Image: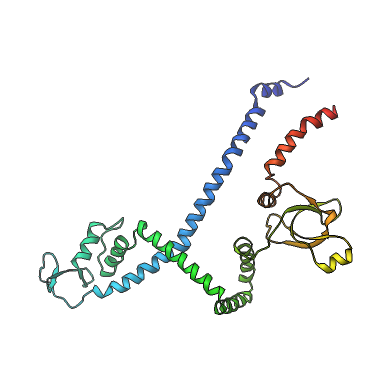
Amino acid sequence: MAPPEIKLIDKLGVGAFRSAVLRGIGVLAPPLLTVVILIWIISTTRQYLLEPVNVGAREGIVWFLSREIRTDLTVTDATKRTATVEGVPYQELDDGNFLPFAIYDRVRRDPGDDKMPQTAKGVLHRYVEVTYLRPYFAIPCFFAIFILLVYLLGKLMAAGIGRFFGDRIELAIQRLPLIRSVYSSVKQVSNFFLSDKQMQFTRVVAVEFPRPGMWSIAFVTSEGLIDIRAAANEPVLGVFIPSSPMPMSGYSLTVLKREVIDLNITIDQALQYLVSCGLVVPPQELQRLRNSEPTETSSNG
């Protein structure tokens, strides 16, 4: 006879409550994780790409506008601390330098979260931010320039001189003890997803690997080598067996065609299965499993 505590738990429906919570988490987890990953990508891009570019662009524009700073003027209006040169008013700052009043007035009307800058360089920095580097203008401009640079780099690498310098740079990186390991991993990932010369998989199969009775997912890459086909005296296939959860690395094997089992899944579904370490099963496989459950139950009964 079950103890009273167990009966009470059963009455409260703790098991049903836990199942409902787990189902709810299963529904919410994918979109929440997607949002978190997108936010991380955006924040990382902003921190390590947009911010350095923004600082560099600001310093460059400030350097160009520094010619507007005047040090050889005399105040003509002591109350307003202004000087006039050929009809153009200049404002004196606390550091003794003069700037055109139009620049000073633009910053005075929008000083930002900080107080009004009191130096010529400080006013120019703020002036560049409110005039040239506003987000709605700077971000699309930076993005367009970035795409253009990537395009030009790709065209350069396609030419002989670009490939020559690229190989020299990569050779220098490969000689650095710690950096070469990180660089090699990143290069494998980028080549797998971005290279237009990556392996062309034709279909998804299963092969017995690494030993008989143990099956692994593989991608068919070719009809195999002629010499191996002649030695086996029967059709063979060249396959790539990816590792999990990083499918960009693995093993290239030549197997007998009769020992290969074709799988009714797409290449994308196979990659999802590998990356998730077998947790993400293709939908059609789940449906087939559900459809077979009643039959198996009845046959056992």
In the picture, the quarter occupied by the N terminus is top right
Residue 251 in percent (x, y) is at 76, 62
Up/down of 103 relative to 168, above or below: above
Coloring applied to the structure: rainbow
Q: Is residue 132 left or right of residue 222?
A: left
Residue 281 in percent (x, y) is at 69, 44
Residue 58 falls in image quadrant: bottom left
Residue 159 in percent (x, y) is at 55, 76
Up/down of 209 relative to 198, above or below: above
Q: Is residue 188 left or right of residue 34?
A: right
Residue 169 in percent (x, y) is at 58, 77
Comparing 251 with 257, the one in front is 257
Residue at x 67% of width, y 28% of height: 15
Q: Is residue 297 left or right of residue 26?
A: right
Looking at the rendered structure, the number of numbered marks drawn on it comes to: 0
In the picture, the quarter occupied by the C terminus is top right
Up/down of 277 relative to 184, above or below: above
Up/down of 241 relative to 81, above or below: above
Residue at x 39% of width, y 66% of height: 55
Q: Is residue 213 left or right of residue 247?
A: right
Comparing 264 with 243, the one in front is 264
Residue 66 falls in image quadrant: bottom left
